[in-house]
Image: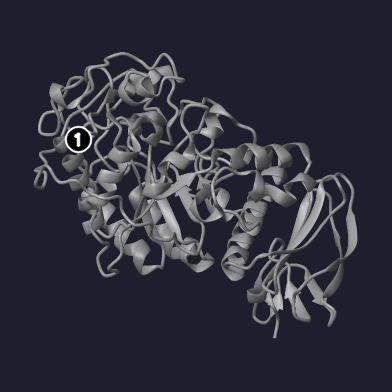
Amino acid sequence: MRLPVLALATAVVGASLVPAAFGQDRAPTPATAPVAGPIIQMFEWSWDSVASECTSFLGPKGFGAVQVSPPQEHVVLPEAGYPWYQDYQPVSYQLETRRGNREQFAGMVKTCNDAGVQIYVDAVVNHMAGSDGDHPGSAGSEFTKYDYPGTYSDADFHECRRDIANYEDKWEVRNCELVGLSDLKTESDWVRQSEIGYLNDLISLGVSGFRVDGVKHMPPEDVGAIFGGLNTVPGTGQKPYVFQEVIADSTTTAGEYTGNGDVTEFAYHGKVSDAFKNGSLAQLSKLGDSMTLPSEQAVVFIDNHDTQRSAPTLTYKDGAAYDLGVAFELAFPYGTPQLISGFAFDDADAGPPAEADGMTKPASCDDQAWVCEHRRPIIAGMTGFHGAVGGAQLTDWWDNGGGQIAFGREDKGFVAINREGGELSQTFQTSLPAGSYCDVMSGEVSDGSCTGQTVEVGDDGKFTATVAANSGLALHAGAKLG
C-alpha cells in the first residue's frame, strides 16, 4: 500500500473483539486456488451497488470475484475532503464504513455468491490509524493514536514510533511506521488473534478470500500465523483464497511470502503497461520468463488503486491503449488477472462521489463520475475469453517486431492486437477448429449470430482479417456459432 503524507491526518477506535485461545503456533494456510474468472476490484463501491452489479453484470459476464474496499471502521477526514485513503486507516473491526453497515455488507456477500461471484475483502492488518482522532470513526468510535478502546492499546504497537526512513533496512520496514500509521505488533498473540477473529467474522458471512494490504511491512511468519488461523468458507470445506500485496524491492522480495499464498507481481504492471503505452508489444512473447514469481502464484494487474495515483503508466484515462492492455492481461497465460473499476479523479487524493456527510453515493455506470472500466466492451468481452481458454497454453505467436501481435491458447482461443497507427491485415495461423466465430472485442453471440464482426476459420486453422489501428480481435470456443 502506498499512502500520501496526508494519510496521517486522523485516526479512529475499536469494536470489542474477544480473541480465541492464545499461544498457538499456526502453520501457514495451504494455498487455495483463485476463481476461474478474473478478480475485479470494485474500488470504493458501496455494498448495495456491488450487490446490484453482481446480479446485473458481473455474474452473467463471467467475473469470478469482486475485491471490495476495506469493510472495517475507518477514520473520517472531512478537512481533507473525505479522501480515498481514510478507508485504509482502521479504527476498529466493526463492519461500519462510508459504503454501508454490517447488514448491507452481509446482504452484498449473499447476493454476489448467489450470482456466482465470490467476495474478496481488502484486509488491512499491518496497522491502525495514525494520529489522534479529531473525529469519531465511521462507526462512532472515539480513539487516540495507540489507543483504540475495545481493540488495541499502547502495548500492542511496535516501539519504533517514527516513519520508516530507510527502506533498505528490513527491520525498519517491518517495525517502524508507514506514513505515521500505528504499526501493530503482529508477532503478539493478542494482535494475531484479534486479526484472526476479524477475518473469521468476515468468513462467517460468506467472504471467500482476502487481498492483504501492506504485507512487506510484516514478517512472513506473522502473516503465515494469521492465515493459519482462518476458518473454512461456509459450505465449501476450503480455506479462503489469499493473495498478498508485496511491492518488491532490493530489500524485500515477493518470493519471501509465497509460502503463505499468492503474491502481487508488481513487475508485470510495469512491463506490460509500459509496452502498451509505447506500442512495443513484440517484447511480450516471453513475458513469463521475465517475472520473479511462477505463474500459479502471481496476481497481475495493469493498474490498481495505488498505481493509478502514484505510478500512472497506464490507466482508464489512456482509452484504447488501456483497454488493449487489459485485453492482453486477460488473454496471455501468466498469473491471476486482477482488474479495477473505480471512479473518475483529477486529484490523486480525492475520495469517491459522496454526499455532504462523506457517505459514498450509489455507483452508476450511467454517471460519468464512475468510470466502470469493467463495462467497456473490449474488457467485458475479454472476460469471457479468459474463462473460455482456462489453462490452455500459449501457441501460434506472431508479431511484426513492433506493436502488432497475435497468439493463441491451443484450440480454445486466439487474439490479435494492433497498437500501431495503421491497419493490420494478415492471414493468421491458429489451432482453432474450423467454423464461424464472433469477435468478442467488437460484440458477442446473440440469438445465434454475432453483434460484432464474424470471422471464418478454415479447416487448416487459418483466417484472414483486418484489425484497425489501436484495436483488437479475439475468438474463443464459447463464441463459436452453430
Q: Residue at x 20, y 39 (%)?
A: 192
Q: Residue at x 33, y 20 (%)?
A: 177
Res. 310 image quadrant? top right
Q: Determine whether 151 is above or below 437 in the image.
A: above
Q: Is residue 184 visible?
A: yes
Rendering coords of residue 86 (x, y %): 34, 29
Badge count: 1
User: Which residue is under mark 1?
Assistant: 92
Res. 23 image quadrant? top left
Q: Determine whether 216 is above or below 207 in the image.
A: above
User: Residue 429 versus residue 77: which sits nearer the camera?
Assistant: 429
Q: Is residue 51 visible?
A: no
Q: Determine whether 155 is above or below 92 in the image.
A: above
Q: Residue at x 60, y 54 (%)?
A: 334
Rendering coords of residue 455 (x, y %): 80, 72
Q: Is residue 56 left or right of residue 193?
A: right
Rendering coords of residue 228 (x, y %): 26, 51
The amino acid at mark 1 is: Ser
Q: Is residue 144 left or right of residue 165?
A: left
Q: Secondary structure at mark 1?
A: loop
User: Residue 403 versus residue 335: which sits nearer the camera?
Assistant: 335
Q: Quadrant of the N terminus?
A: top left
User: Residue 424 versus residue 293: which sits nearer the camera?
Assistant: 293
Q: Is residue 235 left or right of residue 54?
A: left
Rendering coords of residue 64 (x, y %): 46, 62
Q: Quadrant of the C terminus?
A: bottom right
